[in-house]
Amino acid sequence: MKADVLLGLQWGDEGKGKAVDVLAPSYHWIARFQGGPNAGHTLWMDGQKIVLHTIPSGIFREDCMNLIGNGVVIHPPSLLQEIKALRQHGLRLEGKLMISAKAHLILPGHRLLDQAFESAKGDHKIGSTLRGIGPAYTDKYARHGLRYGDLAGPQGKALLETAHEEHLRQLKALDFELPNNLPEHVQEWMDAIQELHSDFAPADGSWLLNQALDQGQKVLAEGAQGSLLDVEFGAYPFVTSSHTTSASACTGLGIAPNRLGTVYGLFKAYCTRVGSGPFPTELRDQTGEALRCAGNEFGATTGRPRRCGWLDLPALAYAIRLNGVSQLIITKADVLSGFEEIKIATRYQGLDNHFSPYPDVPSKCIPEYTSFQGWALDPNHQYQEVSEFPTEFRRYIEFIETTLNIPIKLISFGPERQQILAVDN
Ligand code: GDP
Ligand code: IMO
Ligand code: MG
């Protein structure tokens, strides 16, 4: 059996949480492979909104095991809070949620360092979610990070203290004013990891998944962020600190490349981006504002307004190439309802369709657009066949499929679980 991968092809918030929740009943395991609580994956259950940050989006499906893989970074108090919120929804997580012993930890100092580095950048801010992601991955690769399994033994407290003192030294050198409640936060952090360890023993995630695949079970690797925020292939430095592309499912879970199967590439019917960095099709006008309102485009983690713009096909083609996408999923098709004219960027002037997301991309890349006539989806209709969609919308979909030469397998037309159509092409 091979493991499938589902990831975002844009700048995050493509609707990965909803899509994973919809696909989860056909999988035995859902496994997060990178990122941390900078992610916000929104699910709607019977009119109730639930945002997952570190826990995989298969958690609401009864027979689905969920793994927080070794490539993820964990902030214990936030994870515990997330677990408690799910318990309040009546979920039992013990035996259903596994946490890799090798997943690195976001320590209290990492969050402060994130703030210190961002404020030192002045006008050149990345727009980080300030969840400590960058500093935690920095320590991982500098080989003095702490992992979930490292803190399980009696030496845990001493390890944390040593790491914390080093962070305090760095913060002092940056002239960062420490918050008064830092000692309480460190204690809360320590209590949280102890509580997590008592309910979720550090696991060998790679072994669990490979065993599952050997036994013919189905595994879906869930991405966070989006391909254009990849630390290597995004517009560096306006990126996150992990690899968000499909190769990362191998290193972030301990699965060999020849064990990867279908790669689902998810994209919104338009584009959004939170934080700084290039965004060639951004609409800084009333149409952008209208998209933000219609799509309720505010960050699931930070609540910040998302920048909005038209769909960018050269950028999508770039993400498809990086990930080896075999099937596409389009989300938020309903949001474009009611716009008279809808545009898609099909190429960049003078760039021979070669999208290259360096930070100076907007000045170099002037998008050329193809216009489409708008459509209206009925918000109360449960679309069962593509033929039920308005002709103008079908034209839009066909144009994307033909240009990218990849089939669209799922069309999401609303936030709820049932508002999705599997295309039989
Ligand atoms: P993720 O980070 O990729 O999981 O996406 P987010 O949860 O951050 O943002 C996607 C937002 O769009 C969430 O509020 C979802 O509930 C919502 N959503 C997902 N699919 C659809 C859709 O097809 N239509 C509409 N209107 N909203 C959707
Ligand atoms: P999901 O999984 C959208 C963005 C931040 C910032 C940059 C770096 O919900 O799609 P970081 O906190 O990683 O240092 O921030 O990346 N970013 C996201 N944008 N969705 C996300 O996750 C994001 N995670 C990080 O806004 O621009
Ligand atoms: Mg999100």
Image (cartoon, grey):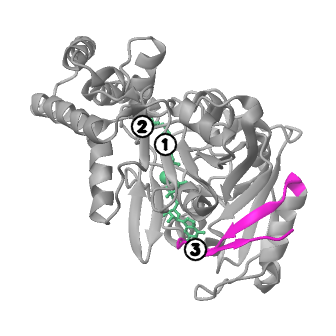
Which amino acid is tagged 1?
Leu
* Quadrant in the picture for residue 333: bottom right
Q: CA distance from mark 3 to mark 1?
A: 27 Å
In-image side of 338 versus 258 (left or right): left
- Residue at 77% x, 46% y is 325
**Is residue 283 among the parts visible in the rendering?**
no
Q: Earlier in the sequence, mark 3 or mark 2?
A: 2
Mark 3 and ligand 1: say if the CB distance to the nearest ligand atom is below 8 Å: yes
Residue that badge 2 annotates: 99
Which amino acid is tagged 2?
Ile
- Circles 1 and 2: CB atoms closer than 8 Å: yes
Disc 3: CA contacts within 10 A as few (<14), some (14-19) or many (>=20): some
In-image side of 261 versus 187 (left or right): right
* Element type where label 3 sits in the image: loop
Which amino acid is tagged 3?
Gly
Q: Nearer the viewer, residue 331 or 48?
A: 48
Residue that badge 1 annotates: 67
- Residue at 54% x, 68% y is 295
Disc 1: CA contacts within 10 A as few (<14), some (14-19) or many (>=20): many
The residues colored magenta run 403-425
Q: Residue 424 colored magenta?
A: yes
Q: Is residue 331 above or below residue 354?
A: below
Q: Nearer the viewer, residue 347 or 270?
A: 270
Foreground: disc 3 or disc 2: 2
Q: Earlier in the sequence, mark 3 or mark 1?
A: 1
In-image side of 395 versus 363 (left or right): right
The quarter of the image holding the N terminus is top right
Q: Is residue 101 above or below residue 340?
A: above
